[in-house]
Image (cartoon, rainbow, N blue to C red):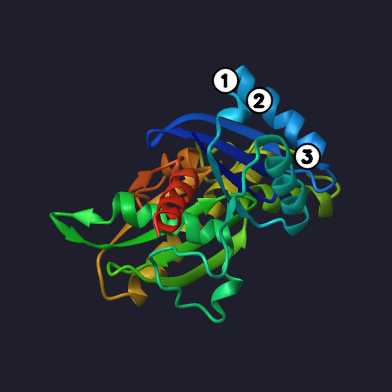
Amino acid sequence: MLLAVDVGNSHTTFGVFADGELRCELRLSTRHGWTRDEVAIALRQGLELAGFSLRDAHDAVIACVVPPALPPLREALVRYAELDPLVVGPGVRTGMPIRYDPPQDVGADRIVTAVAAHERHAMSGGERIGVIVVDFGTATTFDVVSPSPEYLGGAIAPGIGISADALFARAAKLPRVDTAKPDRVIGRNTVGAIQSGLVNGYLGLVEGLIARIRSEVDFAVRVVATGGFATSMAAHTASIDVVDDALVLEGLRIIHARNRSK
């Protein structure tokens, strides 16, 4: 059993792989102040609810963009599961050259999703094409992978949740609303106007950046969306070709296999 862990700014996702297949997925809030023992208790209880045991894991792989959360997680896996996890970072074999300056500045989660997107979605008509990965997380990231593959870079924008929070925090008279797409772009009331600005405005950001990225590359691309808002956003735009919620966990599995097989 392989335990794959993605530590994001808002949530930490644990995936259990057996025989190369994702069998279980757990999602916990990322907490900077958790101790080693608190991590172990939460993980053990979550796995037991899904019918698995932490002791059954034979190896682990981690991608982390929250540095304070990494030490207690590693210590928990070492102490309670006797695992020495592979942590995605400089020196780890990804199978994808990083054309970024400097390469170590790219978040581990961005590299992991890029690797998985190329592996799973870069074939068209028997030929390799490029991919644009749009990850709707705390921030929305756009990552570009060439057919060869090479990680070429991308763009980072505030996530729709951050945008909504900033609007409500800075405008005293505006109410907090659900980020649901209204029937009309022209809002007939305050709630409708806010929803239109948030959702339709964000769709414009996504579509505009995808179009501009396409104009800068000289190869065909497939746009792959992942993350919390991927499904809802993809339902309202033709710019996204496919939604793949398992990208980050699959990417961790792929990178683990490429390194442990050396």
SS under mark 2? helix
Q: How many marks?
A: 3
Q: Residue under circle 3?
A: 175
- Amino acid carrying mark 2 in the image: Gly
Q: Residue at x 81, y 48 (%)?
A: 32
Left or right, 224 with reference to 89: left
Left or right, 123 with reference to 205: left
The disc at residue 50 is 1
Residue 239 location (% of width, % of height): 36, 53
SS under mark 3? loop
Q: Residue under circle 2?
A: 46
Crowding near the residue tagged with mark 3, few <14, some 14–19, many ≥20 C-alpha atoms within 10 Å: few
Q: Residue at x 51, y 64 (%)?
A: 92
Q: Is residue 240 above or below residue 89?
A: above
Q: Residue at x 69, y 23 (%)?
A: 45
- Amino acid carrying mark 3 in the image: Pro
From the viewer's side, name the closer residue of 201 and 109: 109
- State which quadrant residue 236 falls in: top left
- State which quadrant residue 215 falls in: bottom left
* Residue furthest out toward the bottom: 101
